[in-house]
Image: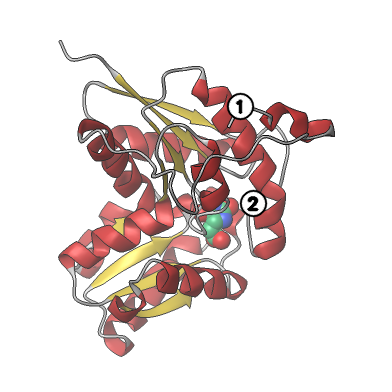
Amino acid sequence: MKPRMRIQVINPNTTASMTAKIAAAARLVASPGTDIVATQPDEGPVSIEGYFDEALSVPGILEEIARGEGQEIAGHVIACFDDTGLDAARCFASAPVVGIGEAAYHMASLVAGRFTVVTTLARSIPALEHNLVRYGLASRCGGVRAAEVPVLALEDPHSSARDRVSGEIDRAIRDDRAEAIVLGCAGMADLARSLSAEHGLPVIEGVSAAVRLIEDLSVMGLSTSRIGGWASPRRKPLSGRYAVFSRAS
Ligand code: 5HY
């Protein structure tokens, strides 16, 4: 029997119901021998909606990675579509780190010539557009759209969130010539299959994509390169709450 693989999936916000939803999406695609350890920071924003929330969530992400390191983790998923703290996490973590945004973009590019991203609020759009450029996939994206739903509306079954996302998908197909849709929020992780069936095109959500990619990296024996920007942190005094991040380089 092959040894079990353990993947830590981190919800960078502090909303437990979203962490549970993310965990369910991860377990739906994880291989039989893979354990999903879903976590969220003890402190931080209840949802991440733009640059300010992103910044506040990064220490908590790194604290969760530090906690995971002692559990023989094969890799870490950052389950926030902005890929919040991804670069810092890759420097800090010993195991590979995959962001759900980057993972979803790459998966979409394998099944469609053009994809559109549907996220929550317009304030999140520039960060996602920047990531697409950074990842080299902007040319494959027909647009980043906002359904104009607050992140936590996705946790309310009585909200119009799903209908608003579905309406944006209709407009993406009509106006962007979208051949696939990327769901631009971890809180949409439970909507991909039903929206795909409803609209008749691939709908990709990043939690599943990231879990599969971590499994593949682990099986291929690949981990983060340390000879460039993701080099391990240099040893230096870290004071106060950041002392927990001190480690040998
Ligand atoms: C996310 N916010 O995936 C992002 C996406 C967004 O709390 N989880 C969040 O809507 O900005």
Establish if 140 lies above or below 237: below
Residues tagged 1 and 2 counted as in contact (Cβ below 8 A): no
> Would the CB of label 1 be found within 8 Å of ligand 1?
no
**The quarter of the picture showing ligand 1:** bottom right
SS of the residue under disc 1: loop
Residue 89 appears left or right of 203: right
Residue to which mark 2 is pinned: 47
**Compared with residue 143, is residue 82 higher up or lower down, i.e. above or below?**
above
Q: Give the percent coordinates (x, y) of residue 19.
A: 52, 37
Question: At numbered mark 2, what does the secondary structure look like: helix, strand or loop?
Answer: loop
Label 2 CB, ligand 1: below 8 Å? yes
Quarter of the image containing the C terminus? top right
Where, by quadrant of the figure, is residue 224 drawn? top left
Residue 129 appears left or right of 29: right
Amino acid at circle 1: Ala
- Which kind of residue does numbered mark 2 sit on? Ser
**What residue do we see at 30% from left, 68% from top?**
181
Measuring from the top left, give residue 113's x and y in whole percent: 19, 76
Q: Is residue 182 left or right of residue 61?
A: left
Q: Which residue is mark 1?
A: 248
Specify whether residue 220 is in view.
Answer: yes
